[in-house]
Image: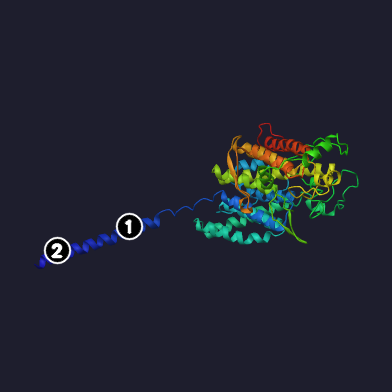
């Protein structure tokens, strides 16, 4: 009996030894296994930065050309941070005017995540350039926490952020040489006294926006006047003249509910005011550039574009927007043409009020026509001619979605919306589209043609 008990006891001891040994082996195998890789940074982080920048632009009532400048340099900072690991982006940057001579390469950390650096480079650039950029600090902290939740080590996050800030410093140095700071010292723009010249419009009667934007350094164009359009139709009070007929066309537009919806969807006027008795309250609208940056990121999401390619698309789109505004503004302050609202009230109907509020700058060319068409050329290069998408950009501002079969269809609608809105003559729209095609095509050819322009 005693032998039997001893045998059972020995078996129990052996079993426990086996369990302990097995547990130790499991623990050893776990400790020797590779740590779980962090989840990748997705392209929606780029879209989030653009959205945060847009919110601050609305807060600051940033004018459309300046908004494009902010998007361009922030996106370029993201591209530069990625270029240390992505040769194709480094090659693209060499084709940007004055870039290689100004932007220096800096030493990379031993361990960092270049996509985290890219986001922080964008944020830091926007923080320094936008008047209320400090508001982005909260978002910076949120992004760092998301990186931690994705599995990135805190040290990697910190080193990636530090590198992104260093890269941003190089981009800010480049931005400081674009001549914009000099424009504040130029003579104050005074409306011309000549008949048919632009004059401030109600309800805000704002001073003209960025009259010297054409003096900045473009990213891809040779100069702001590279694609100078034909002169606008000559001002005339003769009822048989081309100008008078265009004026009547604006006045007589039949505004269906669909046309009203189109005009509202593409309004994108940061200066719009709501009159409330003796008070005028800003309506807080996005710029046309912000709308197209949003469209670009919708396309990236629909096509599940990788982070690096999405950064390139944002950068090229933003820089082409900047150059499109330069080309358009160059002509606006050369022709200084009167707005429909002003001349219709004088010659046809003193009580005329356009559907949309007239923005504070000369009429010819139509900015929406130029920048929308240029954007459509750029996005079509990346996504193709028949890229169907739903535009949700204006939903947060109380407008419904709109479906498009391609970017050119959207650009056509954006352009004609200015006629429906009563703020542009038809030649400003058609010639604006022409300039937009030329600027967009020049940009794509310069960057991607085998016989690339130097």
* Callout 1 secondary element: helix
10 Å crowding of disc 2: few (<14), some (14-19), many (20+): few
The residue furthest left is 1
Where does the N terminus fall, quadrant-wise?
Answer: bottom left
Q: CA distance from mark 2 to mark 1?
A: 27 Å
Q: Position of residue 145 (x, y in %)?
A: 54, 60
Question: Pointer 1: residues within 10 angstroms few (<14), some, or many (20+)?
Answer: few
Residue 412 occupies which quadrant of the picture?
A: top right
- In front: 164, or 206? 206
Question: Which one is in front, 408 or 242?
Answer: 242
* Residue 96 seen in this snapshot: no
Looking at this view, is 241 or 368 the one in front?
241
Q: Residue 86: give x, y in percent of width and height.
A: 59, 44
Q: Nearer the viewer, residue 219 or 314?
A: 314
Q: Dot 2 lies on which element?
A: helix
Where is residue 403? Give x, y as percent: 59, 42
Residue at mark 1: 25
Whether residue 114 sits left or right of residue 336 in the image: it is left
């Amino acid at each position: 009996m005693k032998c039997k008990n001893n045998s059972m006891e020995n078996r129990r001891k052996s079993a426990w030894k086996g369990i302990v040994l097995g547990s130790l082996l499991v623990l050893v195998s776990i400790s020797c296994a590779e740590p779980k890789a962090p989840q990748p940074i997705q392209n929606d982080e780029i879209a989030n930065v653009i959205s945060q920048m847009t919110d601050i632009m609305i807060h600051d009532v940033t004018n459309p050309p300046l908004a494009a400048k902010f998007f361009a340099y922030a996106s370029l900072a993201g591209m530069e941070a990625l270029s240390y690991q992505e040769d194709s982006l480094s090659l693209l940057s060499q084709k940007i005017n004055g870039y290689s001579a100004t932007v220096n390469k800096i030493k990379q950390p031993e361990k960092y995540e270049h996509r985290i650096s890219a986001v922080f480079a964008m944020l830091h650039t926007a923080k320094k350039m936008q008047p209320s950029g400090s508001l982005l600090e909260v978002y910076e902290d949120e992004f760092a926490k998301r990186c931690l939740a994705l599995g990135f080590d805190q040290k990697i996050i910190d080193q990636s952020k530090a590198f992104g800030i260093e890269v941003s410093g190089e981009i800010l140095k480049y931005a400081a040489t674009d001549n914009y700071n000099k424009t504040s010292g130029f003579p104050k723009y005074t409306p011309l006294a000549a008949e048919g010249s632009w004059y401030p419009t109600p309800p805000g009667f704002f001073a003209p926006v960025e009259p010297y934007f054409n003096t900045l350094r473009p990213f891809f164009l040779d100069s702001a006047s590279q694609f100078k359009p034909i002169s606008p139709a000559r001002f005339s009070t003769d009822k048989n003249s081309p100008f008078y007929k265009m004026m009547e066309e604006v006045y007589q537009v039949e505004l269906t509910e669909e046309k009203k919806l189109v005009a509202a969807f593409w309004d994108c006027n940061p200066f719009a005011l709501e009159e409330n008795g003796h008070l005028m309250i800003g309506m807080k609208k996005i710029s046309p550039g912000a709308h197209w940056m949003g469209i670009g990121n919708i396309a990236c999401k629909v096509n599940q574009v990788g982070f690096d390619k999405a950064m390139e698309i944002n950068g090229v789109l933003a820089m082409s927007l900047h150059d499109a505004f330069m080309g358009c503004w160059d002509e606006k302050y050369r022709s200084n043409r009167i707005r429909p609202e002003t001349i219709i009230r004088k010659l046809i109907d003193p009580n005329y009020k356009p559907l949309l509020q007239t923005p504070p700058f000369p009429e010819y060319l139509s900015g929406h026509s130029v920048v929308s068409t240029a954007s459509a050329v750029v996005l079509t290069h990346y996504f193709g001619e028949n890229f169907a998408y739903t535009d949700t950009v204006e939903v947060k501002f109380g407008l419904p979605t709109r479906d498009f079969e391609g970017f050119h269809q959207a650009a056509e609608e954006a352009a004609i919306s200015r006629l429906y809105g009563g703020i542009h003559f038809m030649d400003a729209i058609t010639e604006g589209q022409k300039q937009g095609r030329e600027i967009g095509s020049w940009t794509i050819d310069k960057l991607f043609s085998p016989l690339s322009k130097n």
